[in-house]
Amino acid sequence: MRFVHLADVHLGASPDSDKEWAAGRAEEIWQSFYRVLDWCGMEQIDLLLIAGDLFHRQPLVRELKELNYRFSRLSGTKVVLIAGNHDSIGPNSAYAGFPWSDNVVMLDNSEMDSVYLEDLNTEVYGFSYHTRDIYEARCDSVRPGVEERINILLAHGGDERDVPMDRKRMVQAGFDYIALGHIHKPEMMGERMAYCGSLEPLDKTEGGEHGFVLGEIEKEDAPESGEASGQNDPTSRITLTFVPFCSRQYIDLSISSDAADTNASMLDKTLERMKEKGEENMFRLVLTGVRDREMEYRTEEFMRLGRVVQVTDETRPDYDFDELARENADNIIGMYIERIRSLAGGNQPLADKALYYGIDALMQKGRLRGSSDACSSSGSCGSSDSVRRNEVAD
């Protein structure tokens, strides 16, 4: 029996709602889901499991009708779904009593229920949310009823507010597979339990590939009388594969700067790297390395390069600490460099990191209050022009 495990589609969501591409992303989620349905038809998938949060909020009747038509076209695929915390079945939910196609079953009960798909010899267990939060661990004690069947648990949750789960107990319950939703990052937990993650990334924190789990289960004959029970061994063979399927990703991109770089050159570097990674993706940029002491990168210009959702400038001024120590041996800057290097005990990277931040703070103090504040109480800051530039301008 071949199945697709899908969850957290969040139809109706608009990721990056403050960005110009938000409307396109909302439609893209619908289209990605339809592509999965088309893929199931082409690949002759036996069973499509949807582990909650198909919608980002309460679905409209017209939306369910559209989906139901799409499901009905899957002549060789059964569909079993549950409602999650986002699309929980409230008193006026369109889910309640909706007339699904013959190949679709919604386990819409608020208590654990199951459906037996006779032609697949498969029983799917699960329940739907009827409230936003469920604090009870409703899945830990569930056990399959008929061992000869392929037994699948369909569940949504896994944190303290949304059906806490004891993963070890669930794995030992005897299910052939446990299909989980709610956590948006894909995670395989052994060979019989997985979070498939969200179909599309829905937030800038959701980096990496997104898609669904493709599985295949072959059920062996049940053990004869007197043999070990299948309670902790489902007596089946299973293969699971994560299938990347998202239209685009959030990608962390680090752009390295050196003292020769300008704002324009860093913009060019960034554009080149974005093209390498695929301009259709969304990017979280981190500017790293050193910059000229008089250079400041204008992060707002990086935000306008394309689908950029965040820019973090971690570059540091290109200070020559040996030169600064020599030129400021008799003031607070020189004393600070000597003290930090002493405390670091030969750990050069640690010392340099502390010196970058400390010296920059001292220089900022000199810039704001005058060079005398960055000097010793004697008023001596050295006499050369280079020292004065270091203390005040940098």
Image (cartoon, rainbow, N blue to C red):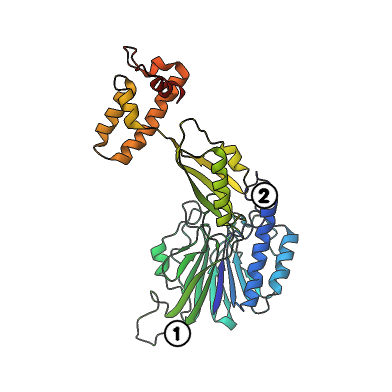
Residue 267 appears in the picture as rendered: yes
Of pointers 1 and 2, the one earlier in the residue sequence: 2
The percent coordinates of residue 303 (x first, y second) are: 60, 42
User: Which image quadrant: the N terminus?
Assistant: bottom right
Indicate which label's residue lies in the foreground, 1 or 2: 2
Label 2 belongs to which residue? 22
Q: Nearer the viewer, residue 84 or 11?
A: 11
Label 1 belongs to which residue? 220
Element type at mark 1: loop
- Identify the residue at image location x=68%, y=78%: 75
User: Which image quadrant: the C terminus?
Assistant: top left
Residue 132 appears in the picture as rendered: no
Q: Relative to 335, is 70 above or below?
A: below
Q: Relative to 186, is 307 above or below?
A: above
Q: Nearer the viewer, residue 326 or 151?
A: 326
Element type at mark 2: helix
Q: Nearer the viewer, residue 287 or 322?
A: 322
The percent coordinates of residue 314 (x first, y second) are: 46, 39
Q: Nearer the viewer, residue 296 or 186?
A: 296
Say which amino acid is labelled 1.
Answer: Glu
The percent coordinates of residue 35 (x first, y second) are: 66, 67
- Identify the residue at image location x=34%, y=31%: 321
Say which amino acid is labelled 2.
Answer: Ala
**Extreme top residue here?**
378
